[in-house]
Image (cartoon, rainbow, N blue to C red):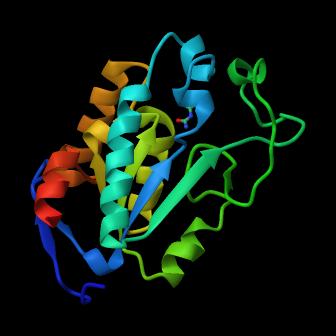
Amino acid sequence: MPATGDRIEVAASPFPYALDPAHTALVVIDMQRDFVEPRGFGETLGNDLAPAATTVAALIALFREKHWPILHTRESHKADLSDCPPAKRLRACAWRDRHRQVWQGLFYATEVGDILTKRGITHLVPAGVTTEVCVQTSTREANDRGYECLLIEDATASYFPHFKAATLEMIRAHGAIVGWTTPLDALSKAVG
Ligand code: C5J
């Protein structure tokens, strides 16, 4: 485990991101069948997010190799689907689990904040789907709580490319007002 205070500089936008390996976690957001596989909600919107899954898998492999923590989230809904948007209700199957996101954010009404605090995490690397919904909301929630966030550009996807482009731009606007963005390649090169 790296010593606290060691920093790795990652080439990122709008300027280099100082990653603190002893306090960094990957957050894989909602890489679930309904969003990325054929016949899921994603397909009903006419789009295919599968290419991002390959990059997310490589990102997970990188964190595993480093023995850095990884947190997976899954969007899910109440058994009676009362909290499920109508567009998803047609094909949703309900489940309950301990870490379910109630809405689109990682922190709201979940125990994620406590888990990260207990582990001393201060830096988050978000990835997953969809960029402008759960990924953006979670990154903003994290930023509001003081986490330094580095969103991996090619490990996130949207059904609408212009929404993804706008979200990345908003996150890094005004001198990283919400966080930083970079491709996986840049992170891999930096961490070796
Ligand atoms: C959506 C999500 N887009 N995980 N959910 O409905 O971003």
State which quadrant residue 179 falls in.
bottom left
Q: State whether residue 67 appears in this view.
A: yes
Residue at coordinates 26% horizontally, 88% vertically from top-left? 4
Q: Position of residue 81 (x, y in %)?
A: 83, 34
Q: Nearer the viewer, residue 160 or 189?
A: 189
Q: State whether residue 17 appears in this view.
A: no
State which quadrant residue 92 falls in.
top right
Q: Nearer the viewer, residue 145 or 23?
A: 23
Quadrant where the image shows the N terminus: bottom left
Residue at coordinates 48% horizontally, 81% vertically from top-left? 119
Q: Position of residue 83 (x, y in %)?
A: 78, 37
Q: Is residue 82 above or below residue 3?
A: above
Q: Is residue 147 above or below residue 12?
A: below
Residue at coordinates 41% horizontally, 52% vertically from top-left? 139
59 horizontally vs 82: left or right: left
Q: Position of residue 22 (x, y in %)?
A: 31, 81
Quadrant where the image shows the C terminus: bottom left
Name the quarter showing ligand 1: top right
Tell which residue pokes out farthest to the right in this image.
Answer: 80
Tell which residue pokes out farthest to the bottom in this image.
Answer: 3
Q: Nearer the viewer, residue 113 or 93?
A: 93
Residue at coordinates 56% horizontally, 29% vertically from top-left? 35
Total labels drawn: 0
37 horizontally vs 78: left or right: left
Q: Position of residue 190 (x, y in %)?
A: 12, 62
